[in-house]
């Protein structure tokens, strides 16, 4: 092994780190909860992971030529500084790339996780050969990567694809919605769990002869995966909650489709790939959109941003500009 790169997918609740060879093949990978606290704690966590993965893969640390980072924040392309950092508040206002370069001792290139999910699916996933598509990543937060005419749409301030701030799902004028984004406040993982808990409390108070009273199997603090499993087993309350999530996602897809008219929409992230969701989303979009795009789950699953991060690290190691490929 003469060279390798580091790929990092930094999320609000977990971080995936991988060492990949010069062909992009992953040699070693790990996932763990994201460190709490200031940015330096997360940088130190990634540095420890890199050291452990190098040892596991038999790669000398000096042979790691570059690092690519997928981050759940918007990066201003002019200043390099981050904004929309509620999922990782320790990075607010920082030059994230510079922080990681100092901590890792490597050239670092980074991009929004939605953009890198789109890059991953476009290079090695469901969007190979497609020039106009959108990847929607739903997990602890929500974001997207928009590819139009074969190029990522980043926008003037790096906010292209920041669909968390669509004024849908909750009151966009509410201070909490304005900080997090109204659409994210309605659709992302924490909102799903909150709705399920509220529904369970209301369900317990229903009359014994009510159709929904017949023993929901949902556990407290249910995630969408729990809800989908219960819905598949015939739980009517879970089915109602799963359909509510699908309707909200369909509204977001329809709003994006009205602006960029993609051929393909790819659902990704821990929430986006949950079984049982896709068919419901398709059905609701079909009733809302004049010309519905094809909607699929990503072939790379929740690992799409990591694959994209490895790709931009390889481009940096080869001396190409990861944003232009030249």
Image: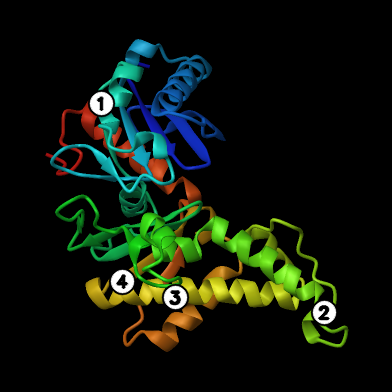
Q: Nearer the viewer, residue 169 or 27?
A: 169
Which of discs 2 and 3 lies nearer the camera? The answer is 2
Residue 319 in percent (x, y) is at 16, 28
Residue beneath label 1, please?
98
Per the model, the C-alpha gap separating discs 1 and 4 is 32 Å
Give the Cα separation between the discs numbered 2 and 4.
37 Å
Q: Quadrant of residue 125?
A: bottom left
Mark 1 vs mark 4, foreground winner is 1
Examine the rendering and report whether any part of residue 66 can be seen. no
- Residue 256 circle label: 4
Please state the total of marks drawn on the protein image: 4
Where is mark 2, residue-wise? 213
Q: Would you place residue 155 above or below residue 313 in this image?
A: below
Compute the Cα span from label 3 to label 1. Answer: 38 Å
- Residue visible at 73% across and 78% down? 236
Q: N-terminal of the two: label 1 or label 4?
A: 1
Does residue 214 appear to the left or right of 229 in the view shown? right
């Amino acid at each position: 092994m003469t060279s390798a790169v580091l790929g990092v997918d930094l999320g609000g609740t977990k971080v995936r780190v991988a060492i990949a060879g010069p062909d992009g093949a992953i040699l070693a990978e790990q996932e763990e909860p994201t460190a709490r606290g200031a940015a330096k704690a997360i940088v130190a966590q990634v540095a420890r992971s890199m050291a452990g993965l190098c040892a596991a893969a038999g790669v000398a640390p000096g042979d790691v030529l570059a690092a690519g980072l997928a981050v759940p924040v918007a990066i201003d392309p002019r200043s390099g500084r981050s904004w929309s950092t509620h999922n990782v508040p320790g990075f607010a206002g920082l030059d994230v790339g510079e922080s990681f370069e100092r901590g890792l001792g490597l050239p670092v290139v980074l991009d929004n996780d939605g953009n890198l999910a789109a890059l991953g699916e476009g290079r090695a996933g469901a969007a190979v050969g497609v020039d106009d598509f959108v990847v929607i990543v739903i997990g602890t937060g929500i974001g997207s990567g928009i590819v139009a005419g074969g190029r990522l749409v980043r926008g003037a301030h790096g906010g292209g694809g920041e669909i968390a701030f669509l004024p849908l799902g909750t009151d966009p004028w509410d201070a909490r919605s304005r900080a997090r984004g109204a659409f994210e406040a309605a659709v992302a993982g924490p909102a799903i769990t909150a709705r399920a808990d509220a529904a369970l409390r209301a369900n317990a108070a229903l009359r014994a002869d009510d159709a929904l009273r017949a023993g929901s199997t949902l556990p407290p603090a249910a995630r969408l995966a729990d809800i989908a499993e219960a819905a598949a087993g015939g739980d009517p309350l879970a089915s109602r909650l799963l359909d509510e999530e699908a309707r909200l996602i369909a509204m977001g897809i329809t709003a994006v489709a009205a602006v960029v008219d993609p051929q393909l929409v790819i659902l990704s992230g821990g929430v986006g790939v949950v079984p049982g969701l896709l068919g419901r989303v398709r059905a609701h979009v079909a009733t809302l959109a004049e010309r519905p795009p094809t909607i699929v789950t990503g072939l790379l699953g929740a690992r799409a941003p990591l694959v994209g991060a490895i790709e931009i690290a390889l481009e940096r190691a080869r001396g190409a500009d990861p944003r232009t490929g030249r």
